[in-house]
Image (tube, grey):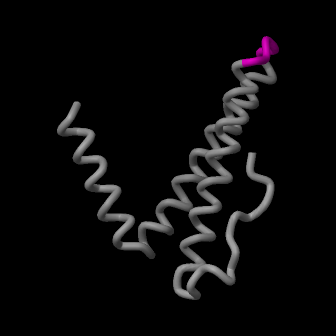
């Protein structure tokens, strides 16, 4: 589980820092989704399971928000994401 920001600003170019911040946000949200879904699978308490899965869904929205911002800023990332989706569609 990530507990700190995995970015060393001294090693990232000034123009890339915001993109790295967005990627770190995506990583944190994905970690949270995994944690909440795993805990939901472990509990037998219906109320706890319901709340954990609801929070996990909210985190998925946060991933989408960070990703939308990143794709607006990083054209290469946007293009590669489209390519990846097309490759999957062709193979499936």
Indicate yes or no whether the magenta region holds residue 69.
no
Specify whether 75 is left or right of 50.
left
- Residue interval drawn in magenta: 42-46
Q: Residue at x 58, y 88 (%)?
A: 14
Q: Position of residue 46 (x, y in %)?
A: 77, 15
Which quarter of the rendered picture does the N terminus lie within? top right
Specify whether 63 is left or right of 1.
left
Q: Which of the 4 image quadrants contains residue 38?
A: top right
Q: Residue furthest bottom?
A: 14
Which quarter of the rendered picture does the C terminus lie within? top left
Question: How many marks on residues?
Answer: 0
Q: Which of the 4 image quadrants contains residue 23?
A: bottom right
Q: Position of residue 41 (x, y in %)?
A: 70, 19
Q: Position of residue 75 (x, y in %)?
A: 35, 73
Specify whether 5 is left or right of 34.
right
- Magenta stretch: helix, strand or loop mostly: loop
Q: Residue at x 74, y 64 (%)?
A: 5
Q: Residue furthest front?
A: 11
Viewer-closest of 31 and 66: 31
Q: Position of residue 81 (x, y in %)?
A: 34, 56
User: In the picture shown, does residue 43 fall above or below 2?
Assistant: above
Q: Residue at x 54, y 73 (%)?
A: 19
Q: Residue at x 78, y 60 (%)?
A: 4
User: In the picture shown, does residue 30 fall above or below 72?
Assistant: above
Q: Residue furthest left?
A: 90
Q: Which of the 4 image quadrants contains residue 71?
A: bottom left
Viewer-closest of 48 and 12: 12
Specify whether 44 is left or right of 7.
right
User: In the picture shown, does residue 53 fall above or below 88?
Assistant: above
């Amino acid at each position: 589980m990530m507990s700190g920001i995995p970015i060393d600003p001294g090693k990232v170019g000034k123009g890339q820092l915001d993109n790295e911040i967005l990627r770190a946000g995506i990583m944190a949200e994905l970690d949270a989704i995994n944690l909440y879904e795993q805990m939901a699978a472990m509990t037998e308490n219906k109320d706890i399971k319901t709340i954990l899965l609801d929070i996990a869904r909210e985190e998925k929205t946060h991933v989408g928000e960070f990703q939308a911002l990143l794709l607006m800023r990083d054209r290469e990332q946007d293009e590669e994401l489209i390519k990846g989706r097309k490759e999957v569609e062709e193979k499936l």
